[in-house]
Image (tube, rainbow, N blue to C red):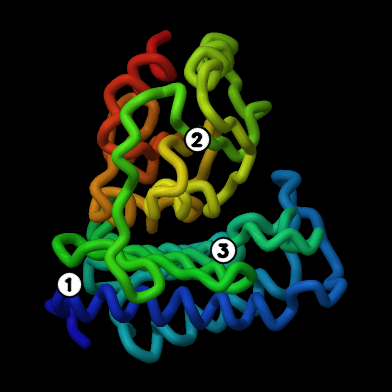
Amino acid sequence: MTHAASQESLLQAVQECAELAGSVAFSHYRKNVAVEWKGDGSPVTVADRGAERAAREWIHARFPADGVLGEEFGEQAGTSGRRWLIDPIDGTKSFVRGVPLWGSLVAILEGEQVIAGAGCFPAVGESVAAADGCGCWHDGTRARVSDIGEMAAATMLITDDRAFENAALRENWQRLTGTASVRATWGDAFGYLMVATGRAEVMVDARIRAWDIACFLPIIAEAGGVFTDFAGASTAFGGNSIATNAALAAESRRILCSI
């Protein structure tokens, strides 16, 4: 494939790459893998490294001019103007405890614009993928966010509410979720999957890296939702994120992000 590859072909490619990474990671799941701790305090295992290595090899074989940035092996520059972001296991802490709420994430960017993304969640048997203008696809069928427009009926999710470094934002999160039907920490990538497929209405990360969330920009948008950072920008590089259905988008951001 060339730089001019169609959106449909990129949708297929990003999904295949995420599923490959997910299959490699899943082969180590619940196998008592050894855990190492990185300088930032996050865990890493042979499963993370093996999944990212497989994804990089897959990309290099098919898109040799594209750059790659992955959580475990850093950045490899390309010449095409296109770059792939890889999070081989988003939710490694869950993974090593045998909790199935983890995913393998892959995104394709042109500059800082995410044009395609996919997440594979092999421990729960689900996958989701989207590309600009091609829709959001969940296990082969079109995915849509929910139509719930009342806070009291909403399910609101966060990876870890201890991650708020700003006390006002932490208080705003408490306000936002105070009347919610469900408030839970079904965090990491799994929360965004829930929003994209209409099973939750709000997902928040107070501190995040681009590879953790990039794939979800087209996934949430193509499912009819809204993905931004706390400043309201549609970006994977804002350091935080809020993904919602359309009906609660404005109100959720007004409550959470007003400081």
Q: In this view, does 16 lie above or below 30?
A: below
Name the kind of residue labelled 1 in the image.
Gln
Q: Is residue 207 above or below residue 1?
A: above
Observer-nearest of 193 and 70:
193
For label 1, the crowd category at 10 Å Cα-Cα, with few meaning under 14, some 14 to 19 and many 20 or more, is some
| Residue 173 x %, y % | 53, 19
Q: Which residue is drawn at 66% across and 69% down?
A: 48
Observer-nearest of 161 and 139:
139
Q: Do the residues labelled 3 and 1 touch (CB within 8 Å)?
A: no
| Residue 89 x %, y % | 61, 64
Observer-nearest of 24 and 54:
24
Label 1 secondary element: helix
Name the kind of residue labelled 2 in the image.
Thr
For label 2, the crowd category at 10 Å Cα-Cα, with few meaning under 14, some 14 to 19 and many 20 or more, is many
CA gap between label 3 and label 1 equals 23 Å
Label 2 secondary element: strand
**Nearest-to-viewer mark from 3 and 2:** 2
Q: Mark 2 points at which residue?
A: 155
- Mark 3 / mark 1, whichever is N-terminal: 1
Q: Quadrant of residue 249?
A: top left
**Nearest-to-viewer mark from 1 and 2:** 2
Q: In which quarter of the image is residue 137?
A: bottom left
Q: Do the residues labelled 3 and 2 touch (CB within 8 Å)?
A: no
Q: Mark 1 points at which residue?
A: 7
CA gap between label 1 and label 2 equals 32 Å
Q: Name the residue under label 3.
A: 103
CA gap between label 3 and label 2 equals 20 Å
